[in-house]
């Protein structure tokens, strides 16, 4: 029996194969066998249109985003300057005018 890789998200060793995917029973993360932690480190963060993002870029929000825990909404077309890319689920740190510091997912923005 071949040794399966540990989960790239939580490092659990109890992974199993399900069809063509590898699954972690502890955090429910699913990934392809070719997706190794080494290839994840080389991945670039891309916007909704597939353009690569970099620190200091200016982006535009492409969807109304509710701010969790408040009644505020980040409107479509809001321009955000000088972003910072970080690791994690929300991969953009920024300051939105009128709202303040926020973390955004790159799938809801486009590069200007």
Image: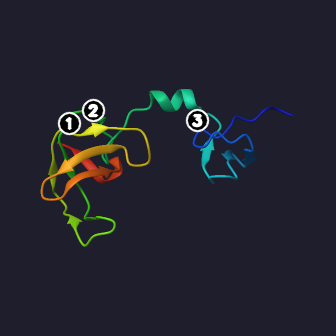
Which secondary structure lies at badge 3? Answer: loop
Callouts 1 and 2 close, C-beta under 8 Å:
yes
> Pointer 1: residues within 10 angstroms few (<14), some, or many (20+)?
some
> Which numbered disc covers residue 57?
1
> Pointer 2: residues within 10 angstroms few (<14), some, or many (20+)?
some
Which secondary structure lies at badge 2? Answer: loop
Left or right, 39 with reference to 92: right
State the residue position of label 3: 35
Inter-mark Cα distance, 1 to 3 = 27 Å
Q: Residue furthest right?
A: 1
Q: Which is nearer the eye, 44 or 91?
A: 91
Q: Residue furthest bottom?
A: 71
Q: Which is nearer the eye, 18 or 38?
A: 38
Rendered location of residue 3, percent (x, y): 79, 32
> Pointer 3: residues within 10 angstroms few (<14), some, or many (20+)?
few
Q: Tell me how the rendering is colored.
A: rainbow
State the residue position of label 2: 54
Rendered location of residue 29, percent (x, y): 60, 50
Q: Can you say which quadrant of the picture contains the N terminus?
A: top right
Rendered location of residue 74, percent (x, y): 21, 62
Rendered location of residue 87, percent (x, y): 41, 38
Residue at x-position 48% and y-position 29%: 41
């Amino acid at each position: 029996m071949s040794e399966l890789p540990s989960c790239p998200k939580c490092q659990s060793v109890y992974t199993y194969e399900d069809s063509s995917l590898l699954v972690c029973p502890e955090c429910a993360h699913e990934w392809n066998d070719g997706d190794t932690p080494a290839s994840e480190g080389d991945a670039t963060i891309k916007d909704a249109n597939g353009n690569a993002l970099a620190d200091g870029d200016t982006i535009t929000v492409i969807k109304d985003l509710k701010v969790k825990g408040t009644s505020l909404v980040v409107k479509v077309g809001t321009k955000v300057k000088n972003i910072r890319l970080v690791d994690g689920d929300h991969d953009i740190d920024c300051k939105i005018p009128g709202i303040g510091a926020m973390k955004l997912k790159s799938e809801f923005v486009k590069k200007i």
